[in-house]
Image: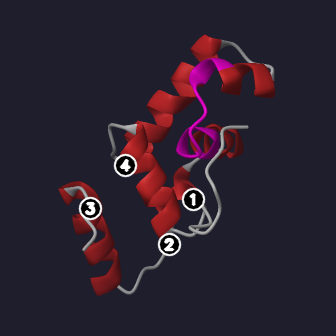
């Protein structure tokens, strides 16, 4: 079976009960989503910063905002959530940038 962190499982169950199927990623800004997907694919902060032409500190700020908005605390949970919501193709090899 698959394991979901308790807050994620509770949120998905609550949304299913209420008939809501919105993705939690809808709460993110375009840039936060972009940063989140790079992290979910395995890129590190320095590579993301270079690729997006922003500072490491800005990447860290976006990452903190993403984690807060999605109620997660690590990149593994982020990758899992992205896959569950169809933002990562399960058949695709994950390669950073």
Left or right: 76 with respect to 25?
left
Quadrant hosting residue 10: bottom left
Q: CA distance from mark 4 to mark 3?
A: 8 Å
**Measuring 51% from the left and 31% from the top, which residue is drawn there?**
63
| Pointer 4 or 2: first along the chain | 2
Which residue matches tag 4?
77
| Pointer 1 or 4: first along the chain | 1
Q: Secondary structure at mark 4?
A: helix
Q: CA distance from mark 4 to mark 2?
A: 18 Å
- The circle drawn on residue 26 is 1
Q: Is residue 38 above or below residue 87?
A: above
**Measuring 47% from the left and 51% from the top, which residue is drawn there?**
79
- Looking at the rendered image, the disc whose residue lies closer to the viewer, 4 or 2, is 4
The location of residue 49, given as percent across then percent down, is 70, 21
Q: Is residue 33 above or below residue 53?
A: below
Q: CA distance from mark 1 to mark 3?
A: 20 Å
Within 10 angstroms of label 3, few (less than 14), some, or many (20 or more) residues? few
| Pointer 1 or 3: first along the chain | 3
Within 10 angstroms of label 1, few (less than 14), some, or many (20 or more) residues? few
- Looking at the rendered image, the disc whose residue lies closer to the viewer, 2 or 3, is 3
**Measuring 49% from the left and 39% from the top, which residue is drawn there?**
66
Which residue matches tag 2?
22
Residue at the outermost left position: 6
| Pointer 4 or 3: first along the chain | 3
- Looking at the rendered image, the disc whose residue lies closer to the viewer, 1 or 4, is 4
* Magenta stretch bounds: 37-46
| Nearer-the-camera pick, 59 or 46 | 46
Q: CA distance from mark 2 to mark 3?
A: 18 Å
Which residue matches tag 3?
4
Q: Secondary structure at mark 3?
A: loop
The location of residue 85, given as percent across then percent down, is 51, 68
């Amino acid at each position: 079976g698959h394991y979901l962190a308790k807050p994620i499982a509770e949120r998905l169950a609550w949304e299913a009960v209420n008939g809501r199927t919105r993705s939690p990623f809808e709460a993110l800004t375009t840039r936060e989503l972009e940063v989140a997907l790079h992290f979910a694919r395995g890129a590190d902060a320095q590579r993301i910063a270079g690729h997006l032409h922003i500072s490491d500190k800005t990447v860290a700020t976006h990452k903190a905002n993403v984690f807060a908005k999605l109620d997660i605390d690590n990149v593994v949970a982020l990758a899992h959530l992205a896959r569950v919501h169809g933002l990562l193709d399960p058949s695709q090899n994950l390669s950073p940038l």
